[in-house]
Amino acid sequence: MRRFSRFALALGLAWLVAPGVPSWADEPLLLSEDAGGILELEGERRLEVRGLRGMLSLRLGRPGELRYAVRRLEGGDAEQPVALWLDGSTLRLSSLEGASEVPVRLEVALAPELSADVEAVDSDLVLVGLHGEVRLAGERLRAAIRNIDGSLELDLKESDVEVVEVNGALTVDGRELDGSLEGVNGRVTLNAEHGRLRLTRLRDELGGFLEEVDLAAEDVLGRVELEADGGSLELSACKAGARLILSETALELRGNAGPLEVETDVDVQIQAHDGPLKIRALAGSVRGSQIKGGALEIETRDGQVLLEDLEASTSIRGVGLDVQVKDTKGDLTISTSVTTIVVEKAHMAVAIDNEFGDVEIREAGQRVQVFNLEGSVRIEAFKGTALVEAHGPSVEVHWTSLDGHEASSVENAGGDVRISLPSRFRAQLDLQAPHGRIESDLDEVRVSPDGHFASALLLGGRAPAPQVKRPTIKVKAAGDVYAMEAAPLPGKR
């Protein structure tokens, strides 16, 4: 391996800058045309590799020097001379004229003072332990990049790339990539179309634009801000929230935290989110479970909203939906039309405003407020205050008990109302059926002679106690009113 004399190079450079030297003295200087060498550095800041193809390896070397060796991949591993140029503070390794198509094995040991800039095609590359600003560009590459102590820029097409540990920012521009990026301490910026990317252990922000890319990002400590058109997006264990603007991009969220805002037009899946969550969908279904730590807002149309195990206060708006909410521990508000709604196990207040669809609520323990047009309402296993205003074929409210002292009101301007009360219920009833009849199997109910009005004081089997407050239940129907004793719960008499 040839060692280049810094003293000899200095003499040559001194001659180039001597009085009377022509203007071409500022042009790149050819240092050698050998198959390898050792160059002692003095002020150089970057190495460029251009026009070489094959198996290219750049690794961290000794301070103050550049070492390289080049062999042919074919023809018995013979030496292959290359050109070493000096251009200002930049060193450049390139193929000799007429030899750019010869596949080679390049080994470079790079001083930590030098940044690296590599351009290649149809090659395998290894970049390990490099410092400063590192750039890799090319087509049809297979690149393994590890332990970069600085920033990394990738500009690739039709390439496979694996990146592990970057102690700086990472920028990816590319098309038709299959990439794995792990352990980046700086911001990651993506601008990619077509392909697949997997990101893990990012310690800063993630942002960019994707087109027809399948992206999976896991364990991101910084905020995520992405726009995507097509493809799919999967975020898991992202800690600082996200803002996602998606078009025809399938979305799956798992185990994330922080404020998260999504604009989309296709399906969304959410599992185990801790923090405020806002989803605005032009269309599509939303499926979610184990959501806590802040408000959940969903707006969509023409799809399903299936939610389970919620600790957040929840708001759902939309048209043409099938809404199913199970086991919610926060307040629930639903404002929809042309929608079927089923709520099961609501521990806090429920407010529903719906038209052209049925509403069913099971096991609610607090206030339930329902306004529903052109659909049936059914409330079962209920323990709270009911405020129901409907215009539909039927309304049913089945109490198991009544906690609190607020008045309940159940009105159906389009059909019948049926309520059921347990035998030990304490309440005051006011029943009205101006255009129908009232039927009851409760002993305390007294129906007017015309059958349109009734009232009752239910003492729950106890003697009257004037000091005890009893909630009032007012019922009014355009059709008939049925006030019945509820069947005992299994195992209770």
Image: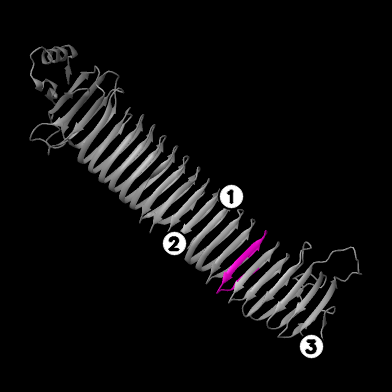
Q: Earlier in the sequence, mark 1 or mark 3?
A: 1
Name the main secondary structure of what is drawn in magenta. Answer: strand
The kind of secondary structure element at disc 2 is: loop
Real-space CA distance between mark 1 and mark 3, rounded to the nearest whole angstrom: 53 Å
Q: Residue at x 44, y 62 (%)?
A: 282
Provide residue 358's location: percent of width, then percent of height: 58, 73
| Residue in view at x 78 percent, y 75 percent | 430
Pointer 1 local density, CA inside 10 Å: few below 14, some 14–19, many at least 20: some
Colour scheme in use: one colour
| Residue hosting label 1 | 294
- Relative depth, front residue between 282 and 204: 282
Question: Is disc 3 placed on a helix, strand or loop?
Answer: loop
Q: Quadrant of residue 79?
A: top left
Where is mark 2, residue-wise?
282
Tell me where the magenta segment starts and ends, as one range.
344-361
Residue 301 sits inside the magenta stretch: no
Within 10 Å of the Cα at label 2, are there few (<14), some (14-19), or many (20+) other Cα atoms?
A: some
Local secondary structure at mark 1: loop
Residue 349 is covered by the magenta coloring = yes
Numbered label attached to residue 160: none
The x and y percentages for residue 64 are 27, 18
To which residue does mark 3 refer?
Answer: 450
Give the mark nearer the N terminus: 2 vs 3: 2
Q: Is residue 426 left or right of residue 211?
A: right
Q: Nearer the viewer, residue 351 or 224?
A: 351
Above or below — where is 162 with respect to 300? above
In this rendering, the label closer to the viewer, 2 or 3:
3
